[in-house]
Amino acid sequence: MAEKVEFELVSPEELLISQPVDMVVIPGGEGHYGVLAGHVPMITTVRPGAIVTYEDNRVTDRIFVTGGFAEVTEERVTVLVEGALKVANLDRAKVEQDIKNFGEDVEDAKTDEERVKALTNLGIAQAKLIAILDDNSGH
Amino acid sequence: MPSLKDLKNRIASVQSTRKITSAMKMVAASKLRRAQEQAEASRPYAERMDRMLESLASDILEKGANADGLPKLVTGSGSDKVQLLLVVTSDRGLCGGFNSTIVRETRRIIRANEADGKTTKLICVGRKGRDQLRRDYGNLIVHYFEDIGKPRLTFADAGTVSAKVLELFDAGEFDVAHVVYNKFKSIIAQIVTTQQLVPLAPPKPKDDVIGRNLLKPSIEFEPEEQVILAELLPRNLSFQVFRSLLESAASEQGARMAAMDNATRNAGEMIQKLTLNYNRTRQAVITKELIEIISGAEAL
């Protein structure tokens, strides 16, 4: 692959990653999509999930994000997130525990507000688990 | 005339004050460096956020601005009767005019609003600002945060503040919101800045934007612009709050450093004066004792 795309991951607190890669797969609000150099410009939302970078057809990095926005131009992908974590650093046992806890929170929620909050947390924890499973199976 | 012992005590006490102030100056200097680094680190996000908002804004303009579909955060509530002020001050004192200037500006705005027949509501961030405003405008303070950004300011801290602002806005509690904070210019200069938060004016697309778009392929949005905008705006609000908190934190340390530097220098001067005074007094005492001995001997 000749051309590379500049991948930038930015949180309000710092510029996390800025490096050229062959391909990035982003968990878009309406489905995952891969970005190669020369992609049509677009702006999308980002769901909780793993951003995967590829180099020479091999996965180089998996980064879990809790959601945000992505801006794609022909030569650049910019992802604005609030928090990011390497998938390799996620602790499976803890994530599974979280899913259990947040699941109970959803059951116990007394107001709609609490329920929405618990559901959001549950969604994030589930996305984390999916990211871990993907990582293990090498997808 | 203070006695020798009194003078000695005073010198000792001023010396220990100087030690404290100079230590505080050092601490402020190192905290300032950290705060500045943090402010610096948030810049890339700001640039990209602006770029994204600009793309969205120009796109929406192109398709013909129909204000109906736009979130209220952009268009405002159609009134400006109730003004919300987010007053950003520090939790701790000993930082010169840092808090007073903010409070003075806040009072000025409140009075100006009163003259225009508008109501003001206050959200105070930081103990010092609230303490100063409580006496005159206690009834205007709707909410109050303290210990924000301890031990380190995170985006989540800004999130709690902006969540409160959004909650009030959704409840129709105010029409227009501003944030008042100290913008960090240098260690000796902090500029009191008032910035509008709600309604949030998207950055004006540059003049050449229309021409540029003809050459460039137009941007696709997924989901559509309105939905993205509706999600992006609250985040942008949090981020604006975050920026002002960062600026304020850097300014606070800068102001404290300058104030402590002054205090250290004053203490130094005072020690010099007191030491001179002490030596003179000591001389006087010795002379007096000699005279006493001599005159005693003469009397024999």
Image (cartoon, helix red, strand yellow):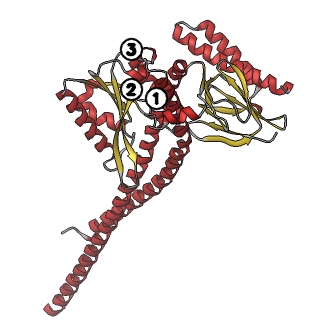
- Going by the numbered disc 1, the residue's amino acid type is Leu
Q: How far across and how far down the image is residue A46, in percent?
A: 64, 24
Q: Is residue B104 above or below residue A130?
A: below
Q: How far across and how far down the image is residue B45, in percent?
A: 55, 38
CB within 8 Å, label 1 to label 2 = yes
User: Which labelled disc corresponds to residue B198?
Assistant: 2
Q: Secondary structure at mark 2?
A: strand
Determine if residue B148 is in view. no
Place residue A80 in its image quadrant. top right
Place residue B186 in its image quadrant. bottom left
Q: Secondary structure at mark 3?
A: loop
Q: Which residue is mark 3?
A: B171
State how far apart marks 1 and 2 are (Cα): 8 Å
Determine if residue A87 is in view. yes
Q: Chain of mark 3?
A: B
Q: Reading the chain from its start, which is encountered first: label 1 or label 2?
A: 2
Q: How far across and how far down the image is residue A79, in percent?
A: 63, 33
Q: Residues within 10 Å of mark 3 (few under 14, many from 20)?
A: few
Tell me which residue sits at (40%, 51%) in the image.
B185
| Mark in the foreground, 3 or 2 | 2
Left or right: A12 as drawn, with respect to A27: left
- Going by the numbered disc 3, the residue's amino acid type is Ala
Q: Residues within 10 Å of mark 1 (few under 14, many from 20)?
A: many
Quick one: quadrant of the C terminus of chain A? Answer: top right
Q: Which residue is mark 1?
A: B237
Q: Is residue B244 above or below residue B188?
A: above
CB within 8 Å, label 3 to label 1 = no
Q: Is residue B77 above or below residue B154?
A: above
State how far apart marks 3 and 1 are (Cα): 17 Å
Q: Residues within 10 Å of mark 2 (few under 14, many from 20)?
A: many
Q: Reading the chain from its start, which is encountered first: label 3 or label 2?
A: 3
